[in-house]
Amino acid sequence: MTEDKIWRKRSGMTWEEPLIFEKSVPGQGGFQIADDPKIDLIKLIPQELVRKHPAELPEVGEAEVVRHFSRLSSWNYSVDLGFYPLGSCTMKYNPKLNDFTSGLEGFTELHPEAPENLSQGMLELWQRLEQSLAEICGMDAVTIQPCAGAQGELCGMLLIRAYFDERKEKRTKVLLPDTAHGTNPASAALAGFEVVEVQTENGILTPELIKPHLGNDLAGLMLTNPNTLGLFETHIQEIAELIHNSGGLVYMDGANLNALMGIARPGEMGVDVMQLNLHKTFSTPHGGGGPGSGPVAVKKILEPYLPVPRVAKTGEGFSLDCNFPKSIGRMTAWYGNALIWVRAFTYILRLGKDGLKLASELAVLNANYVRARLRDHYQIPYPDACMHECVFSDKGFPAGITTMEIAKRLLDYGFHPPTIYFPLVVHGALMIEPTETEGRAGMDEFIAALVKIKEEAETQPELVKTAPHRTPVARLDEVQAARHPILRFNPKESKSK
């Protein structure tokens, strides 16, 4: 028996695991609706929703269905299973206390249209969370309505648009450094602004790079800080002053607030509006399509335009107030992802001021630990110490070995790969964010794997080029899958392939 087969036997994996469709037996099933001549289920369904042809589903018993999904779950990867070092899109362990509080019946059983007198607990949590986030960011007001970081970006840019529209100022341009968060350009464009990219100098935006773009048509600057290279924008206060003197506003993408929380406040750096990600900095679930939450914090000048409804406290308790005539309106149906708020508020209450600061300090320490341990093996494009994440380049690897090969080989060592090929300003980027929740032992194992892959690339290049070798499926062609997705499954075709 080969080493590969031994490994698969121990892990419970079978290389040629048949598809669930290949296990299908006509007429077999695990669930049956009792026949009742008084009930015609088809007639209960609107005709326009009834299928013209039966769904192509496998016919298997209940036990096989349960085993199928249990097996798939064991092949999946999550932050509870191991180190998940995605840069920028922070993936960190979520304390189970957060899940406990968000599962309390008073929150899970609350309907979005419940009357205010039956929603007092949630409304109070809503307001207290907004106040906590405003204090952490050094801002004057917060809305927690946006359901994702990108939607928070759009909300912030719409606030800027509303501000200038009321002042009847035709400002059309928004400056974006080449180190901005990936969704920033789309958010600015969706809000109706013209995006002007500014090339940074050694990964940092300087006042000199901003000055040529100042003018009466400038609406503002979208700056990610720390930026997507993991570097702190050291000139942010001077740059903010230049933007303000030109009549513009400063938007800060707060996706990387987990490097600053409890240490520095963006509002004191000259920032007028920012979004922050509860599903990253404040330890709520991330990935798998959601749920996310992207609150927006603003200074006083933008508060009148915040989305409605907003929570108001009166002598009779808490209520929802829509009486804000300058508001940009709703950003989403209902009020947002409420149970994510519960998780984030739990995290804030549990850690307190000192704990939040420690979390940021550990995030920065861990990233610099990884950077220092790998600097003799992987090229570092920028010499300065990093903040919450570190970026490496695939330069220096033997010809033919790319970042993709490194990522694929990491799978064989049991690690989810880091973010690759982003940011674009770094050739063959590997973007690693260990977060504050990863211990030294886990990071040491990850570092050892990367060092070993570098050695393999030099001595056994084909081993790296053909990776992964120890996963349930062989190497996938992501480009082919994205450009030519299989939209309709044909069991007969699958067997021939």
Image (cartoon, rainbow, N blue to C red):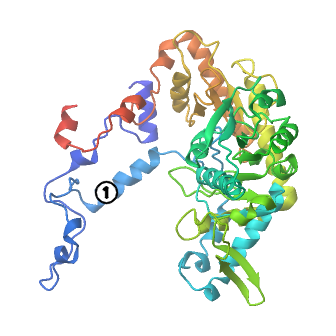
Q: Position of residue 420 (x, y in %)?
A: 58, 30
Please report the residue visible at 74 percent of the width from the left and 53 percent of the height from the top.
273
Please report the residue visible at 79 percent of the width from the left and 45 percent of the height from the top.
247
Which residue is tagged 1? 65
Front-lying residue, 172 or 118:
172
Front-lying residue, 248 or 80:
248
The image quarter containing residue 371 is top right
- Quarter of the image for the C terminus: give it: top left
Q: Position of residue 137 (x, y in %)?
A: 80, 55
Please report the residue visible at 15 percent of the width from the left and 57 percent of the height from the top.
53
Please indicate whether residue 428 sits to the left or right of residue 379 in the image. left
Please indicate whether residue 6 sits to the left or right of residue 486 in the image. right
Q: Position of residue 117 (x, y in %)?
A: 64, 88
Tell me if I can see residue 277 in this picture.
no
**In the structure shown, which secondary structural element does the residue marked by tag 1 occupy?**
helix
Q: Position of residue 396 (x, y in %)?
A: 64, 12
* Residue at the extreme bottom: 316
* Residue at the extreme front: 168
Please indicate whether residue 4 sits to the left or right of residue 84 in the image. left
The image quarter containing residue 301 is bottom right
Looking at the image, is 258 positioned above or below residue 335? Answer: above
Identify residue type, mark 1. Val
Figure disc tally: 1
